[in-house]
Image (spheres, helix red, strand yellow):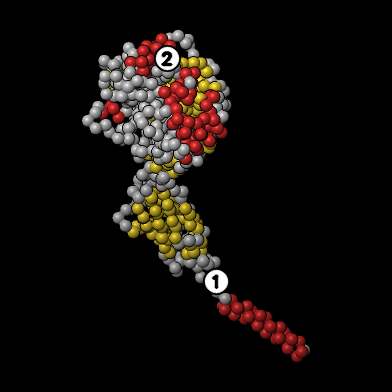
């Protein structure tokens, strides 16, 4: 019986122990404390003034313990004078909850703004918790936006200019794009004038129009940079690369001539180099336009001078050479009453009448292919200060012959050649003279006018000692009533003049033209000859350089 009683007591004690153990454990591990827990305590907004508000941002609020976190509130305070730009909205007053922050900054000026959001709960021991909110409102910044990133033109040498191309300029980024400007730059091998850029407006949207000019460019790929700038643009300046691809034109076929003048001192190096260029070109005909051989003694070039100085260098081309005369090859005296004999005995004896014209006149005309060619005896002194048979003023035998010749050869293209140019760009002003003497030789106006009236196309001269090419033009109005300039551009019927005076004694480097003719298109010193191809209704020209020269001029034209 005792044993059963002991066992019962033991069981009761065990139950008490177990209950005590459970009670003691519960007292040792109470429920965890609670508090406000935020997913972040820093929020940042950024927006551009005047644009729609940025997207709202959220902060998650949870309880830091096992008990419920209730009675949540969110209050906004501002650091600065600007209030009301931030809205704080709770999804619930009991955690977990979402706090939505909305920045209303559309109307605010550019600046940095700050606010504090205080999150509180009466049941949280760590109440309140603070969120710092920064909002940066920036100034609107536009960008230069182009409709294309590069432009390419294609053209053919001597052809018409390619059509212009346009690029649209708009404002990227934010804000107005104003103060637009464009500048064209090019590589060292081409003038920026070969590509022009024009804006339709200085405020975007605008249209940039690019216009290429073939001018006298040789076949190549030319690169330009069109720099677009705007004071308000973040990406200013912006470069637009432009390429101009010029293909070679099909060559003109016909009669090939070379023309040159002023062969220089007897046996001179430059004259010998020009002769090498002529030989390499192997033209059908050679025209020497004066200054062919210097007189070694006396005022007039003799046959012996030709034999000693001209023949060893240019004599190799004698059988295909036509000559005109310079002022040292004709016996002319500016002192009355007879003004000299007018004879060119040395040139007559060396070339013969078929190549230099009849003795005592030294002018003639003939046909080469589809062209009518006229060689004249025109050099200083002027028309009235010459023997009658070689004068060239109005009413003189040479003038009257030219008038009749131009009207008798039909509708052929016409080339005229002689020594003294009508149009010039002067290296020196004319002391005490008419300012227009700097760009024209008054005595030649009659010859030029009768050629224009006779529909001549091209004139090639040998003086001055320079290479110069002019746009087609005319002597404007008449002798008695000229225009103030005495010239006028004429792209329809005008005569193109080319001066090629660099056979042997011209300057290698051109002097600066103090009085530059307004229609002068190319002017340079150098050494070499002019090559001309006389085609059917067309012609081409190209200056052929010696090793001492760097003239870069070529082109083509059409007959009237």
The answer to the question of whether label 1 and label 2 lie on touching residues, with beta carbons closer than 8 A, is no
Quarter of the picture containing the C terminus is top left
| Residue 169 appears in the rendering | no
Mark linked to residue 354 = none
Residue 402's x, y, as percent? 40, 13
Question: Which badge, 1 or 2, is on the more N-terminal residue?
Answer: 1
Q: Residue at x 43, y 66 (%)?
A: 127
Q: Residue at x 44, y 36 (%)?
A: 266
Q: Is residue 361 above or below residue 106?
A: above
Quarter of the picture containing the N terminus is bottom right
**Label 2 crowding class (10 Å Cα cut-off): few <14, some 14-19, many 20+?**
many
How far is mark 1 from mark 2, CA to CA? 117 Å
| Residue 370 appears in the rendering | yes
Q: Nearer the viewer, residue 15 or 294?
A: 294
Query: Which residue is label 2 attached to?
Result: 455
Q: Nearer the viewer, residue 551 or 332?
A: 332
Q: Nearer the viewer, residue 13 or 134?
A: 134
Residue 476's x, y, as percent? 32, 18
Q: Residue at x 29, y 19 (%)?
A: 338
Tell me: 226 left or right of 279. Answer: left
Residue 529's x, y, as percent? 48, 32
Tally of numbered tags? 2
Q: Is residue 3 above or below residue 322?
A: below
Residue 372's x, y, as percent? 48, 16
**Label 1 crowding class (10 Å Cα cut-off): few <14, some 14-19, many 20+?**
few
Q: Residue at x 46, y 55 (%)?
A: 99
Regarding mark 1 in the picture, which secondary structure is present there?
A: loop
Regarding mark 2 in the picture, which secondary structure is present there?
A: loop
Q: Which image quadrant is residue 327 in?
A: top left
Query: Which residue is label 1 attached to?
Result: 31
Q: Is residue 528 above or below residue 409?
A: below
């Amino acid at each position: 019986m005792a044993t059963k009683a002991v066992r019962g007591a033991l069981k009761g004690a065990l139950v008490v122990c177990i209950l005590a153990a459970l009670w003691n454990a519960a007292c040792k591990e109470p429920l965890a404390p609670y508090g406000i827990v935020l997913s972040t305590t820093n929020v940042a907004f950024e927006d551009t003034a005047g644009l729609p508000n940025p997207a709202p941002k959220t902060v998650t609020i949870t309880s830091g313990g096992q008990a419920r976190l209730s009675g949540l509130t969110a209050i906004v305070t501002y650091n600065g004078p600007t209030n009301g730009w931030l809205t704080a909205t709770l999804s619930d007053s009991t955690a977990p909850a979402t706090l939505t922050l909305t920045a209303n900054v559309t109307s605010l000026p550019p600046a940095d703004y700050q606010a504090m959001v205080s999150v509180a709960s009466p049941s949280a021991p760590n109440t309140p918790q603070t969120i710092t909110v920064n909002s940066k409102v920036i100034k609107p910044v536009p960008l230069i936006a182009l409709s294309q990133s590069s432009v390419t033109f294609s053209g053919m040498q001597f052809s018409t200019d390619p059509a212009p191309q346009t690029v649209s300029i708009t404002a990227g980024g934010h804000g107005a794009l104003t103060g637009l400007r464009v500048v064209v730059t090019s590589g060292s091998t081409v003038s920026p004038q070969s590509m022009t850029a024009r804006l339709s407006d200085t405020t975007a949207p605008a249209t940039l129009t690019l216009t290429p000019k073939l001018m006298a460019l040789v076949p190549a790929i030319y690169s330009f940079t069109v720099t677009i700038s705007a004071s308000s643009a973040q990406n200013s300046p912006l470069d637009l690369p432009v390429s101009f691809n010029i293909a070679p034109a099909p060559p003109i076929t016909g009669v090939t001539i070379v023309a040159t003048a002023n062969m220089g001192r007897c046996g001179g190096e430059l004259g010998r180099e020009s002769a090498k260029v002529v030989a390499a070109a192997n033209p059908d005909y050679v025209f020497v336009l004066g200054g062919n051989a210097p007189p070694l003694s006396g005022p007039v070039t003799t046959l012996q001078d030709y034999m000693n100085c001209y023949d060893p260098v240019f004599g190799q081309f004698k059988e295909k050479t036509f000559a005109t005369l310079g002022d040292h090859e004709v016996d002319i005296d500016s002192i009355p009453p007879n003004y000299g004999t007018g004879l060119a005995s040395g040139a007559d004896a060396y070339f013969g009448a078929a190549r230099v014209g009849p003795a005592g006149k030294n002018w003639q005309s003939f046909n080469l292919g589809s062209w009518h060619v006229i060689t004249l005896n025109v050099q200083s002194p002027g028309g009235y200060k010459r023997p009658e048979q070689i004068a060239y003023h109005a009413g003189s035998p040479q003038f009257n012959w030219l008038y009749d010749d131009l009207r008798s050869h039909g509708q052929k293209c016409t080339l005229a050649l002689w020594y003294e140019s009508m149009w010039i760009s002067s290296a020196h002003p004319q002391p005490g003279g008419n300012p227009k003497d700097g760009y024209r030789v008054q005595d030649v106006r009659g010859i030029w006018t009768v050629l224009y009236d006779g529909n001549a196309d091209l004139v090639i001269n040998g003086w001055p000692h320079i290479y110069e090419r002019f746009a087609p033009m005319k002597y404007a109005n008449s002798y008695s009533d000229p225009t103030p300039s005495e010239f006028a551009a004429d792209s329809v019927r005008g005569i193109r003049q080319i001066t090629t005076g660099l056979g042997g004694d011209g300057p290698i480097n051109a002097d600066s033209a103090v009085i530059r003719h307004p229609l002068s298109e190319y002017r340079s010193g150098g050494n070499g000859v002019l090559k001309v191809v006389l085609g059917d209704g067309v012609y081409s020209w190209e200056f052929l350089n010696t090793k001492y020269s760097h003239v870069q001029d070529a082109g083509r034209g059409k007959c009237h």
